[in-house]
Amino acid sequence: MRDLNWKTLSSKYIYKDRWFIARADSCLMANGKTIEPYYVLEFPNWCNVIVVTNKEEIVMVRQYRHAINKTTIELPGGVIDKNENPKEAAIREVLEETGYTIHQIEFLYATAPNPATNNNMAYFFLAKANENLQCQQPDPFEDLDVILVDKKEVLEMIHNSQIIHGVQIGAIYAAYQKLGWIEQKI
């Protein structure tokens, strides 16, 4: 198989702040053509967790997402801090956003949310929650509600477009397969 990797000839940052960095690269493609500018959006890595209670409910959060002007239902999770590993971030984010503590957690997979333009990775975990709740400790600009959703209802919500975070939907199915809640057909 031929090498399809591009060579970066130059990079110039065109915008930088805490959450959004945009850069324009000049790239030499494997076929010898030059493409410029090729815009790359630099975002932090993040994690999400499918948290399962003893009653086989899924712990989810409701929050407003301004970019789409909607309140969404999502998995708890968030940005992985600098020098923090994804598993530590996942445990921290679940506690901060939901008040649930994790007693068992396993890595599902990592994926690139949009590899055509974004440089970040998303890490997904499956966890079992303790029943003893602590107080939520959301970040200063988080305003969210915690909801418990029956495991059957979650799939219905996906199919009815009530859960719409595309990258999270794949992780939900992967968790359900690992738990034996849906049959894996290959």
Image (cartoon, rainbow, N blue to C red):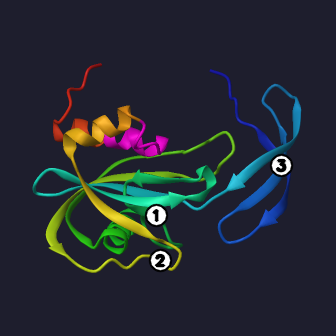
Residue 25: mark:
3
Between 128 and 165, the residue placed more toward the observer is 165
Residue 165 percent location from the top left of the image: 47, 45
Residue depicted at 48% across the width and 41% down the height: 166
The mark lying in front, picked from 2 and 3, is: 2
The answer to whether the residues at label 2 and label 3 have Cβ atoms under 8 Å apart is: no
Ranked by sequence position, the earlier of labels 2 and 3 is 3
Density class for disc 1 (Cα within 10 Å; few <14, some 14-19, many ≥20) is many
Q: Quadrant of residue 98?
A: bottom left
Q: Nearer the viewer, mark 1 or mark 2?
A: 2
Position of residue 12 measured from the top left corner of the image (x, y, whole percent): 86, 58
Q: Which mark is residue 70?
A: none
Q: Which corner quadrant holds the N terminus?
A: top right
Earlier sequence position, callout 3 versus callout 1: 3
Q: Is residue 74 magenta?
A: no
Q: Is residue 160 above or below residue 48?
A: above
Alpha carbon separation for disc pair 1 and 2: 10 Å
Residue 27 percent across, percent down from the top left = 83, 41
Q: Which residues are magenta?
A: 161-172
Q: Amino acid at mark 1?
A: Gly
Which numbered disc flags the more N-terminal residue, 1 or 2?
1
> Which structural element holds mark 1?
strand
**Badge 1 vs badge 2, beta-carbon distance below 8 Å:** yes
Check disc 2 and give the amino acid type. Answer: Asp
Q: Which residue is label 2 attached to?
A: 139
Horizontal and vertical percent position of residue 14: 85, 60
Separation (CA) of disc 3 from disc 1 = 28 Å
User: Is the residue marked by circle 3 packed among few (<14), some (14-19), or many (20+) residues within 10 Å?
Assistant: some
Name the residue tied to disc 1: 78
